[in-house]
Structures are given as C-alpha cells and as structure tokens.
Image (tube, grey):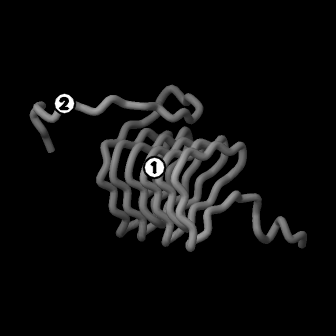
Amino acid sequence: MKNNEINSHYSRIENSTSVQGNIVSEEDFRIDGELKGSLKTKGKVVVGKDGIIDGEVSCSNADVEGKIKGKLFVSETLNLRSTSVIDGDVVIGKLIVESGASFNASCSMNREGKKAEIRLVKDTDDNHEKTA
C-alpha cells in the first residue's frame, strides 16, 4: 500500500495549531486544530474531535466530530458524529446525525443542488420578534 493511501489527500490544520484567516482549497481539508475565518473547498471537510471552526465553511461534504460556530454550506452530505457541536446557520443537501450530537442551528435543505459557495448574510435587526 502506498503512503498517500494510508494518510489520504487531506490538507490539514493540526491539533496544536490555530489559524486566523480565509482558506481556499481544491481538495479535501481536515481540521484538528482551530480555524477562525472561512474555509472554502470543492472537496470534503473533516473536523476532528478537537477541531474548532469559528466562521464560514463551504464544501461538498462534511464529517464533523468537533465544533463549528457560524455559517455552514454543504452541497451534498453533512454527517454529524456523536461528539459534534453545531451552532449557526446551515444549508445542506442531506443530513446524517448520530445520537448525542448537538445541533443548535437554523437549517435548510439545498434543493437546487447548487455547488457550495460561501454566502455572506447581513446581520439581522435585533428588534425583531424571536420565535422558537
């Protein structure tokens, strides 16, 4: 077996690393550390158990064990493992949730099948009525 078959083809932020800024990648990306900013990729995003993203994520598929706070656009499948914590706004193609996952987000299905794009949304007016 080749070495790259064992380690896969992920770009990676290791668990001892914190990054601030915007990342654009053509390939799969794995976060085991912390990202404050945005991540846009045509590939899959994997957030490890210790991984934290505070910002925007746009990808084709996502497998989350860690935490994401912000906007998440997944054109195909979002897979939430039992240790995952999601807070924010989510647009997805399909959603798979394991028992124990924390999903505190507004969620909508991407019925048009559009490819992933980071979308900036204006802040809402704090004077509006909040509903459950």
- Residue 61 on image: x %, y %: 58, 48
Q: Amino acid at mark 2?
A: Asp
The answer to whether the residue labelled 2 contacts the one labelled 1, judged by CB atoms less than 8 Å apart, is no
Q: Tell which residue pokes out farthest to the right in this image.
A: 2
Residue depicted at x 64% and y 43%: 24
Q: Amino acid at mark 1?
A: Leu
Q: How many marks?
A: 2
Q: Tell which residue pokes out farthest to the front in this image.
A: 20
Choose between 68 and 79: the one closer to the eye.
68
Residue at label 2? 125
In the picture, which quadrant includes the N terminus?
bottom right
Q: Residues within 10 Å of mark 2 (few under 14, many from 20)?
A: few
Residue depicted at x 33% and y 53%: 87
Residue depicted at x 12% and y 31%: 128
Q: Earlier in the sequence, mark 2 or mark 1?
A: 1
Q: Tell which residue pokes out farthest to the top in this image.
A: 112
The kind of secondary structure element at disc 2 is loop
Choose between 39 and 101: the one closer to the eye.
39
Q: Is residue 1 left or right of residue 122?
A: right
Q: Which mark is residue 95?
A: 1
Choose between 75 and 118: the one closer to the eye.
118
Q: Is residue 80 above or below residue 115?
A: below
Q: Which mark is residue 70?
A: none
- Residue 100 on image: x %, y %: 35, 69
Q: CA distance from mark 2 to mark 1?
A: 29 Å
Q: Is residue 24 left or right of residue 66?
A: right
Find residue 109 and report its image quarter. Answer: top left
- Residue 132 on image: x %, y %: 15, 44
Choose between 65 and 52: the one closer to the eye.
52
Residue depicted at x 50% and y 51%: 78
